[in-house]
Image (cartoon, helix red, strand yellow):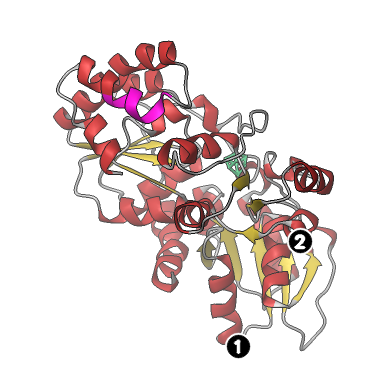
Amino acid sequence: MNDKLTVQEAASVEETLERMLTRLSGIVPEFEIAAKAELAFKVNQLKRECNAVILGHNYMEPALYHSIPDHVGDSLGLSRISAETNADVIVFCGVSFMAETAKVLNPDKTVLCPVEKAGCSLADGITADDVLQLKEDYPNAPVITYVNTSAEVKAVSDYCCTSGNAKGVVKHLLDAGHEHILFLPDEFLARNTADELGIAYVHGADGERPSPGEPTVIGWRAHCEVHELFTVEDVQSVRTQFPDAVILAHPECSPEVIALADVSGSTAAMVNYVRDVDASHYLLLTECSMGDNLAAEFPERDILRLCSLQCQYMNLITLEDTLHSLQKLQFKIELPAEIIARARVPIDRMLAIA
Ligand code: SF4
């Protein structure tokens, strides 16, 4: 992070370029860094003039990730930071539901997403009406929704969670005496969390019923369109080619893939693992920019590269868009006050548990 701050604090385009080259020349072709240094310098200048803070998700492309965010991380870490910032403007370099969460936590601040609609297959996979119907179908089950949902969906939920604290939030409700828990909308995260806790899973999307007296997670049908693409065959192939590689899988991957991985964890957990644990190779089964970003951050680590599994939504966010966002104060996240008030409740409960 210190190196990133020095890129941000560079006093000229030339200094920005020099510092970006130091960080990225093993990862990104130099001509591309040269093309982006001027943009990064302008963004950092304007950010100071606007008293803005830039939050960058771990899936941002390397030149952006390593040059302009004040803070980088996963949804949970960035939510926490957005709840505490003193900046007047929050620019969220991530997809729309993340910027919405920042707005819910900072209703009086200007929150910007650099593109007008950066979607997510999980957030688009469930509506507030779906949640209300599930509440009718399972009236005694509290509702946990993954942070990858719209503010409207959060507003009809009891708790939020991220991939980093899903197990803790479910356990919190089990310890409070709930035996059946609606966990929406990611089927794989719900199944993997139930497996980790050693409790049952039923598919609420198909109307399956939990057994009385048996702790059970009730799930929905949505998937992350990136993580669902990893297969058992992919993992077996890596094991053959790189027998010493540590395979880290995001819990949005299928339970079959998680069962074969060495480690399952959020992107923040992956960062910590690569930083703290020596291995000859690492393979991250997650969006491919993450591997590039960690390879730049930890040049002494040998991170196997994936080039094909990109999130089409995360990749909409560019340095150019971020500059335009600050220049025109676009695209402002606007939510009805009533939705903000109701969506805040499950987010605050999550932050209190986490
Ligand atoms: S990587 Fe998956 S969960 Fe994340 S924004 Fe893209 S589609 Fe949504």
> Is the C-beta separation of discs 1 and 2 under 8 Å?
no
Q: Position of residue 84 (x, y in %)?
A: 26, 56
Q: Amino acid at mark 1?
A: Gly
Above or below, 216 relative to 230: below
Q: Quadrant of the N terminus?
A: top left
Q: Of helix, strand and loop, which one carries label 1? A: loop
Nearer to us in this view, 20 or 97:
20
Q: Position of residue 103 (x, y in %)?
A: 36, 46
Q: What residue sits right under mark 1 in the picture?
A: 177
Q: Which residues are magenta?
A: 19-25
Residue displayed at 62% across by 43% down: 286
Above or below, 259 relative to 337: below
Above or below, 62 relative to 102: above
| 8 sits left or right of 227 in the view | left
Q: Is residue 104 visible?
A: yes
Say which quarter of the image contains residue 204. Answer: bottom right
Q: What residue sits right under mark 2 in the picture?
A: 259
